[in-house]
Amino acid sequence: MQVTQFDVVIVGGGLAGLSLACALSGTRLRVALVEQRAPIRPAGWDVRVYAISPANARFLQRIGVWKHLPEERIATLMAMEVYGDTGARLDFSAYASGLSELGWVIESSLIACELWENVKRQNNLTLFSPAAPSRVEIRAEEAILTLTDGRTVSTKLLVGADGRDSWLRQTVGLSAEATSYGELGVVANFACERQHRGIARQWFRADGVLAWLPLAGERLSIVWSTAEEHARTLLALAGDELSARVASAGQHALGDLKLLTPAAAFPLSLMRVPRTFTARLALIGDAAHGIHPLSGHGINLGFQDARVLGELLAA
């Protein structure tokens, strides 16, 4: 049996795994990335978007990805307004904080595609894709990973970046404590009648939390975190009905809305992993933690995982 040797093998080509691979570019480390499928660049707008913090924008700049993101698809986040269900209000602004911006809102698929292209340009990285792991053996001096196609690799460090249902985490016996919120996050993109001026908005309502994130142009992305029954009601609405419902729930802050993408939904849960490392293995991204989208920090945590681990490995 032929075994290919590496210093670092990353299992999972999501945003965290790809960004770690990019962070290790230019080092003397022999790196491999195992991923079942390449990201697909959608023809239209992606309903899954992220608010990228300034620290992570700097990280993406450092690994050579930010400059390749299309400027016309990036919205600058200048302020945030939070409304309580009893009339209370909180305001945050870049100006009041002495900042030029609070962050940027970008589609998930655009970041993934540019990270993927960056990975393919690396001289010290071997890409196993399409490929998936089937067996792992942890030894004192190395970890042995066998892929479903029979290829085998050895590595000094395995990195699990394979998501909340991490195969690697489960296979090596690292426990995860998942708690369902009993809610779905309904996501969709809309065109808005009025300029959003880079302001994100959140409403804490009796039927859940509605978040509006500004997109490039006069568009916005929403996440309505709500009980499953209400979420399914929203998903069943016709486009004009959903647009009217979302505009009304948001107090018509941006006038009339027009649905641009079909609505979708995903389950919301909290996941804690008491131990994110063991001999010859470390977990990053959603394989290591899962939080409510209310904070908007899921991918920001994942990028920081990749940044810190990358710096440690490159030292």
Image: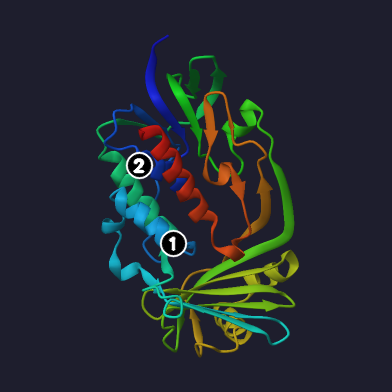
Total tally of numbered discs in the picture: 2
Residue 306 to residue 171: above or below: below
Q: Nearer the viewer, residue 73 or 141?
A: 141
Which residue lies most toward the top here? 1
Q: Is residue 134 left or right of residue 125?
A: right
Pointer 1: what residue? 52
Name the residue rendered at 34%, 68% in the picture. Answer: 73
In the image: residue 286, left or right of residue 35: right
**Pointer 2 with pointer 1, Cβ within 8 A:** no
Q: Residues within 10 Å of mark 1 (few under 14, many from 20)?
A: many
**Residue 313 x %, y %:** 40, 33
Q: Secondary structure at mark 1?
A: strand
Instruction: Check the picture and name the quadrant holding the C terminus.
Output: top left
Point out the image quarter for the N terminus. top left
Q: In the image, what residue occupies the spot 36% across and 34% down?
A: 314
Say which residue label 2 marks.
23
Give the image location of residue 102, x and y in percent.
44, 70
